[in-house]
Amino acid sequence: MNWDDPTDAPGPERLVGSVADREDQAVEAALRPKDLDEFIGQEKVREQLDLVLRAARARGATADHVLLSGAPGLGKTTLSMIIAAEMGAPIRITSGPAIQHAGDLAAILSSLQEGEVLFLDEIHRMSRPAEEMLYMAMEDFRVDVIVGKGPGATAIPLELPPFTLVGATTRAGLLPPPLRDRFGFTAHMEFYEPAELERVIHRSANLLDVEIQADGAAEIAGRSRGTPRIANRLLRRVRDYAQVKADGFITRDIAGAALAVYEVDARGLDRLDRGVLQALLKLFGGGPVGLSTLAVAVGEERETVEEVAEPFLVREGLLARTPRGRVATPAAWAHLGLTPPRSTTAGNGQQDLFGT
């Protein structure tokens, strides 16, 4: 229910991938909450943002610029739309990769209406010239348009109406400090707890006219990797299974059987995740092993393993990145039902050279 516009993250399309595909975009538009009261999860962010917006409305002013950071699928785009709705303002949506020249940004800024919300997704990927122009636009509501080249070039100041910039990023550390400091409110989106995802699933099931039991929602939530977008995607696939294989009513058994067909296990791992763990455990005794070697063993590109599979495995405590290479944790051995060799010491990735 709370999720973002797509990014161009690497790797194949996956049922448990947090990047939105075309089907997700179509469904998300219907499922997105329209105000902060309807938004599920992110309690601290909602409370803080509510204060910011209420204060701005009371002053009759535009809201401060807002920076939202966090993994894909957690609700950054949804919150930007809610900000516009709460302020009674239109919203303009674009992305950092689409702004490659300062002129691109100047064209967008000069066409904004007073109080309008400009949502800039993946803001850390904007070009440097456009980024520097944005500094002045955010602070002084003015940009300098350069006309001509060389010694004859002149700067024409262009006044802008007050607006609210909502920036979204999956990599806040890549934002330069001068840009980050110009945001009046900064929030980090956290992964969701299973109980919160169950509420998301029940709400989405109601909007999609799907009957689901509490234990069925809990089963889907437990495999959703803490991400509402994935929860909704899994709900749709389970719905399809229930309509074809059952009476359309989703129970725990139906949800488990459906997700087994789609190769999503009880912990949310899919084929790629398990392939990485199996190669690490069975071929390399749990590691340490280099990333390139592991990628060859899995039959995937190095970037796919590093940026698509590893983040979730590390977050789940199934894999560790060490200076010597990738190492499986005791939880990985237990999850795949394998017994670690005696030469592997639990948790630290070091091998006992004396076999004790």
Image (cartoon, rainbow, N blue to C red):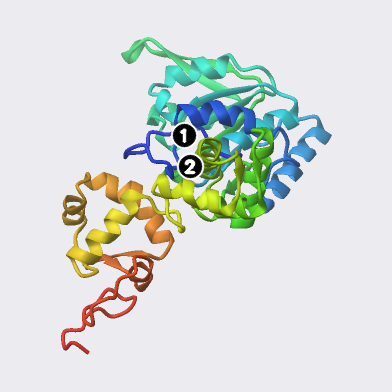
Q: Position of residue 83 (x, y in %)?
A: 68, 33
Are discs 2 and 1 less than 8 Å apart at CB? yes
Relative horizontal placement of residue 356, taking residue 85 as reference (left or right): left
Q: Quadrant where the N terminus lies?
A: top right
Q: In which quadrant of the rendered view does residue 142 lie?
A: top right
**Label for residue 94?**
none
Q: Quadrant where the C terminus lies?
A: bottom left
Is residue 28 visible in the rendered image? The answer is yes
Q: Position of residue 40 (x, y in %)?
A: 67, 46
Tell me what residue is drawn at x 21 percent, y 83 percent.
352
User: Depth check: 57 or 81 in front?
Assistant: 81
Image: 196 above or below 81: below
Relative horizontal placement of residue 183, taking residue 309 as reference (left or right): right
Query: What amino acid is labelled 1 in the image?
Result: Ala
Please give the count of numbered marks on the rendered protein.
Answer: 2
- Residue tagged 1: 20
Q: Position of residue 219 (x, y in %)?
A: 56, 54
Relative horizontal placement of residue 284, taking residue 184 as reference (left or right): left
Q: In which quadrant of the rendered view does residue 152 lie?
A: top left
Image: 283 above or below 10: below
Q: Nearer the viewer, mark 2 or mark 1?
A: 1
Secondary structure of the residue carrying tag 1 is loop
**Label for residue 72?**
2
Tell me what residue is drawn at x 34 percent, y 53 percent.
273
Q: Residues within 10 Å of mark 2 (few under 14, many from 20)?
A: many
Is residue 325 visible in the rendered image? The answer is no
User: Depth check: 44 or 238 in front?
Assistant: 238
Q: Residues within 10 Å of mark 1 (few under 14, many from 20)?
A: many
Tell me what residue is drawn at x 46 percent, y 48 percent.
259
